[in-house]
Image (spheres, grey):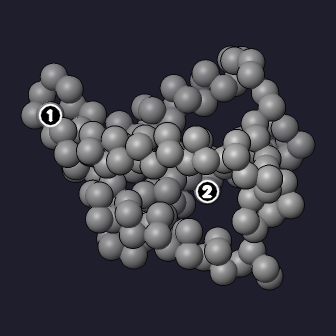
Amino acid sequence: MRIALPSLVAGTLFGAGLALGGMTNPARVRGFLDLFGDWDPTLAFVMGGAVIVMAIVWRIVPRMAAPLFEEKFHFPTRDDLDSRLIGGAALFGIGWGIAGLCPGPGIAALVIAPWSAAVFVLALLAGMTIIRLFEGEGR
């Protein structure tokens, strides 16, 4: 329960940032990805803002003894690229380009455009279920 409130605040802030930044608008996302057509550069500023925040955080984290709401930091330990990771990244990018949504903005869009976002979220959940059935839960 100790972590519930900070997680709720962080998730709410993340969702609000996605909505304010236009990431929940599939047309804007597809316009950003259309480099050789009617390109919309506005999401570059959203991404640039995220990169700046993370650059600051990555300078602060090594100086901290522990995170505020956890006993220790949990950093990724794998550094290898395999076909599963590359294939998943390619599938993610193709789906993002077609739908104009990815998981975070898709869930945030449930508040703004519930019917169209619900189709995306249901397809997302179906895909997650299918991959777990084929690859097993432990992977």
Could you say which disc has been placed on residue 39 in the image? 1
x, y (%) of residue 7?
64, 71
Viewer-nearest residue: 41 or 59: 59
Q: Amino acid at mark 2?
A: Leu
Viewer-nearest residue: 31 or 15: 15
* Residue 99 appearing in the image: no
Question: Callout 2: 10 Å neighbours few (<14), some, many (20+)?
Answer: few
Please, what secondary structure does the residue beneath circle 1 have?
loop
* Residue located 75% across and 68% down the image: 69
Please, what secondary structure does the residue beneath circle 2 have?
helix
Q: Mark 1 or mark 2, which has the lower sequence index?
A: 1
Q: How many angstroms separate mark 1 from mark 2 (CA)?
A: 30 Å
Q: Amino acid at mark 1?
A: Trp
* Residue located 29% across and 58% down the image: 21
> Which image quadrant: the C terminus?
top right
The residue mark sitting in front, 1 or 2, is 1
Viewer-nearest residue: 84 or 66: 66
x, y (%) of residue 134?
79, 38
Residue 107 shown left or right of residue 1 in the figure: left
**Snapshot quadrant of residue 11:** bottom right
**Snapshot quadrant of residue 83:** top right
* Residue located 38% across and 63% down the image: 17
In this view, the residue farthest toward the left is: 38
* Residue located 89% across and 43% down the image: 138
x, y (%) of residue 97?
35, 37
In this view, the residue farthest toward the front is: 63
Could you say which disc has been placed on residue 51 in the image? none
Residue 112 shown left or right of residue 94 in the figure: left
Q: Which residue is mark 2?
A: 125
- Whether pointer 1 and pointer 2 mark residues with C-beta atoms closer than 8 Å, the reply is no
Vertical order, 100 against 33 (above or below): below
x, y (%) of residue 64?
73, 52
